[in-house]
Image (spheres, helix red, strand yellow):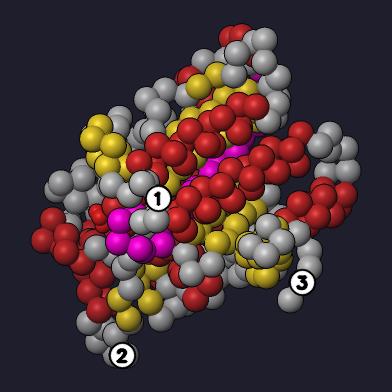
């Protein structure tokens, strides 16, 4: 196994791609990694310490807030705010982005995150994760004129995106726009080591991943698309895998190929997943690994968010599998 740490790998890649880097992004990644190690430790201790269960409050999405959600959010906000590398932080758990005050050290990055994705799985020991999306502060904005609206940029402008997976092992998978690399936490030394260099998503996969329980709420294109995976005419069916944690479902899709599918439905007319801190970062990774991501009408990375918590349908994974689904959307006129 490689003994290259995530930060060593980042520094080597900056020498190649950004020789004038100031160290601010490295500092941001260092603090992000530290936050994830702290969250990972608490996730692993869930059940031993009083961190399972709900806080009793409801978040801006109208969902139950779990204690670990709050812990993960507080950890990330505190570390990002004190990193000196960011000027604004947006989170699934906060109604509005947070701007680092003028009298505190700040930098030119903006970070959005879902602190603990898949939180309904926390209490049942299933993999969960942290998703992040990083932008550079818009050049034309003076710091004190920076508004929440100025932060609403299309995913194409991300400078980095990725996730931490708290699963059978803790992993970091991310991209700075030069391919996708995966690192596994070696808890004996407390470092993420490079274990999955230059990840490429297979062109076709043997799995598809969707909440089949919502079939009757889907439109015809979505129903037909999924039927070609579960009941194909001329070949064996694909295997269904659905964890219900985007990080876990996407991670499998990235490594093994296949399709992750969360369309709009009659209960979620705009889909369920959030564009800025779920769909866009995963789309950045999928494309960097040779895959595709669309909402059924347009490329996810070209969508300009009207607001931080906007939702989107998501069809993501192996390029040929996404294309196959898109044929049904085009034929049905849903496109
Ligand atoms: P969360 O951010 O509140 O945890 O919700 C997002 C999760 C995703 O991880 C997962 O893909 C999806 O919701 C599962 O939704 P459903 O239970 O409707 O299948
Ligand atoms: Mg989430």
Instruction: Give how far across and how far down residue 18 sits, in percent.
Output: 83, 44
Magenta range: 122-140
Specify whether residue 139 is in view. no
Of marks 1 and 3, which one's residue comes earlier in the chain?
Answer: 3
Q: Give me the C-alpha separation between circle 1 and circle 2.
A: 46 Å
Indicate if the residue with disc 1 has its beta carbon within 8 Å of ligand 1: no
**Are discs 1 and 2 less than 8 Å apart at CB?**
no
For label 2, the residue is 236
Of marks 3 and 2, which one's residue comes earlier in the chain?
Answer: 3
- Which residue is located at x 36 percent, y 46 percent? 50
Where residue 224 sits, quadrant-wise, is bottom left
- Which residue is located at x 42 percent, y 47 percent? 116
Instruction: Give how far across and how far down residue 302 sits, in percent.
Output: 49, 42
Secondary structure under the numbered disc 2 in the rendered image: loop
**Are discs 3 and 2 less than 8 Å apart at CB?**
no
Magenta stretch contains residue 222: no
- Which residue is located at x 42 percent, y 22 percent? 96
Instruction: Give how far across and how far down residue 153 sits, in percent.
Output: 53, 31
Closest to the observer, 217 or 87: 87
Near mark 2 (Cα within 10 A), the count class, few <14, some 14-19 or many ≥20, is few
**Placement of 58 over or under 183, stated as above or below:** above
Q: Give me the C-alpha separation between circle 1 and circle 3.
A: 34 Å
Q: Say whether residue 117 is left or right of residue 29.
A: left
* Of marks 3 and 2, the one in the foreground: 3
Of marks 1 and 2, which one's residue comes earlier in the chain?
Answer: 1
Q: What count of labels does the image hold?
A: 3
For label 3, the residue is 2
Magenta stretch contains residue 134: yes
Indicate if the residue with disc 2 has its beta carbon within 8 Å of ligand 1: no
* Of marks 1 and 2, the one in the foreground: 1
């Amino acid at each position: 196994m490689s003994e290259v740490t995530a930060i060593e790998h980042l520094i080597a890649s900056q020498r190649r791609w950004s020789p004038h880097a100031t160290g601010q992004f490295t500092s941001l990644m260092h603090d992000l990694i530290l936050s994830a190690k702290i969250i990972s430790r608490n996730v692993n201790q869930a059940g031993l310490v009083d961190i399972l269960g709900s806080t009793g409050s409801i978040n801006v999405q109208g969902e139950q807030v779990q204690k670990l959600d709050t812990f993960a959010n507080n950890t990330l906000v505190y570390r990002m705010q004190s990193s000196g590398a960011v000027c604004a932080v947006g989170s699934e758990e906060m109604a509005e982005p947070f701007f680092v005050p003028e009298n505190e050290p700040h930098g030119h990055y903006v970070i959005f995150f879902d602190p603990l994705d898949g939180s309904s799985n926390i209490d049942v020991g299933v993999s969960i994760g942290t998703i992040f999306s990083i932008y550079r502060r818009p050049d034309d904005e003076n710091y004190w004129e920076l508004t929440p609206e100025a932060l609403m940029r299309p995913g194409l402008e991300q400078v980095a995106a990725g996730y931490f997976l708290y699963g059978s092992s803790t992993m970091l998978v991310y991209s700075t726009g030069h391919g996708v690399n995966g690192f596994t936490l070696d808890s004996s030394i407390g470092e993420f080591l490079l274990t999955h260099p230059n990840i490429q998503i297979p062109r076709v996969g043997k799995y598809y991943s969707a909440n089949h329980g919502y079939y009757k709420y889907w439109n015809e294109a979505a129903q037909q698309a999924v039927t070609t995976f579960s009941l194909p005419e001329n070949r064996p069916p694909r295997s269904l895998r659905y964890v219900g944690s985007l990080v876990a479902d996407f991670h499998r899709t990235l490594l093994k190929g296949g399709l992750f599918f969360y369309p709009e439905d009659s209960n979620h007319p705009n889909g369920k997943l959030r564009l800025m801190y779920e769909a866009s970062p995963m789309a950045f990774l999928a494309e960097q690994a040779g895959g595709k991501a669309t909402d059924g009408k347009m490329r996810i990375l070209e969508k300009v968010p009207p607001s931080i918590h906007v939702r989107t349908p998501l069809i993501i994974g192996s390029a040929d599998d996404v294309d196959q689904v898109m044929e049904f959307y085009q034929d049905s006129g849903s496109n």
